[in-house]
Amino acid sequence: MTLEGRILSPRGFVRGRLHFAERILAVEEAPVEGPYILPGFLDLHVHGGLGADAMEGKEAVLRMARFHLQHGTTGLLPTTVTAPPEAIEKALRGIAEAMGECEALLGVHLEGPFLSPKRLGAQPPFPQKPDPAWMEDLLARAPVRVVTLAPELPGALELVRLLVGRGVRVQLGHTAAGYEEALHALEAGAQGFTHLFNAMTPLHHRAPGVVGLALERGLWAELIPDGLHVHPAALRLALKSVPGLYFVTDAVAAAGMPDGVYPLGAQRVEKRGEGVWLGESLAGSTLTMDQALRKLVAFGLSLEEAARRLSTYPARYLGLKDRGEIAPGKRADLLVLGEDLRVEAVYLGGRRVAR
């Protein structure tokens, strides 16, 4: 199969023809006109979409995955919320089953339940102390790729070391930790920060907090670029400070739906316009990755940088060597965008996704 247009290659945009089957075969430069051709987006923090919540089981996970695939997300981590053990175990079973039917599903982002009760935000009120034995059980139930935890909890550093030893990316989030407590977690092997700036101790010049640690020493962090969770100026500051900053949607079931009330685990949250709320607290987003791209460009990023931080950077963070770039041998996970940066076509493993 062949596509013509402006192709985002590892060395920047080139005009030409992209030849592919299941994988990229060649990029042939030629003076052609055509749409933008980008690597598929990777969303490493997404709770739901089109009315479906990742906690609800296999069919809901497939529904949300198909919805986000329509918006250019060719790889995603269904993300759990804080819940009783049996609900988390059910969610992991559903995600594992769904992975057998959708190659866009890359594993699990376990956001909680090892979170600070002081920084739950819209997370349901079921935080738990780190439990290595239970964590071992969860790792056996589904391919957990990312775990968000609060590093100040008793036993958190032991859990960080266990997870890092299993190849899991550990992120700091929903935390009341001070700078030093969070630094100990980085020294134990934690790598990332979950929805940077949100649900963590802020930067103060005499108490730098988790935000200060991320800006000073963070190599990787995720951030929600919807314009509600983080001011564009703070987003641009993070870009200057965190080399591996990448962007996520943190989308919930309300994404793609009209205003109304939707599930977020055991909570019920309300979509009002572009925002999702639990009372007066933001409760995830309605963002899709193609919307994120357009917002990032509006915030001042070049199209090339915005696209890479939605694809190449998250692929590198997870260690996925065959995704996130358009180059020979990589998976043919692609999207075609018009001049208005709206999705015209999506390809998953070389097959065009029905729209």
Image (cartoon, rainbow, N blue to C red):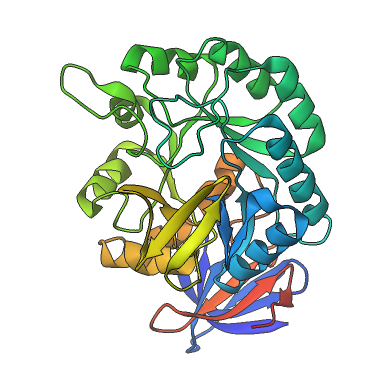
Quadrant of the image occupied by residue 272: bottom left
Residue 330 makes an appearance in the image: no
Picture coordinates of residue 235, whole percent (x, y): 28, 48
Horizontal side of residue 1 vs 289, given as left or right: right
Q: Residue at x 66, y 38 (%)?
A: 145
Nearest the viewer among 148 and 89 is: 89
Quadrant of the image occupied by residue 65: bottom right
Picture coordinates of residue 93, whole percent (x, y): 79, 44
Nearest the viewer among 298 and 36 is: 298
Q: Residue at x 45, y 70 (%)?
A: 13
Q: Quadrant of the C terminus?
A: bottom right
Horizontal side of residue 68 vs 332, given as left or right: left
Horizontal side of residue 284 vs 39, given as left or right: left
Farthest bottom residue?
Answer: 33
Nearest the viewer among 73 and 288 is: 288
Q: Quadrant of the N terminus?
A: bottom right
Nearest the viewer among 134 and 17 is: 134
Q: Is residue 168 positioned above or below 63 on the image?
A: above
Q: Is residue 180 positioned above or below 283 on the image?
A: above
Picture coordinates of residue 206, whole percent (x, y): 16, 16
Residue 141 makes an appearance in the image: yes
Picture coordinates of residue 128, whole percent (x, y): 57, 22
Horizontal side of residue 319 vs 71, given as left or right: right
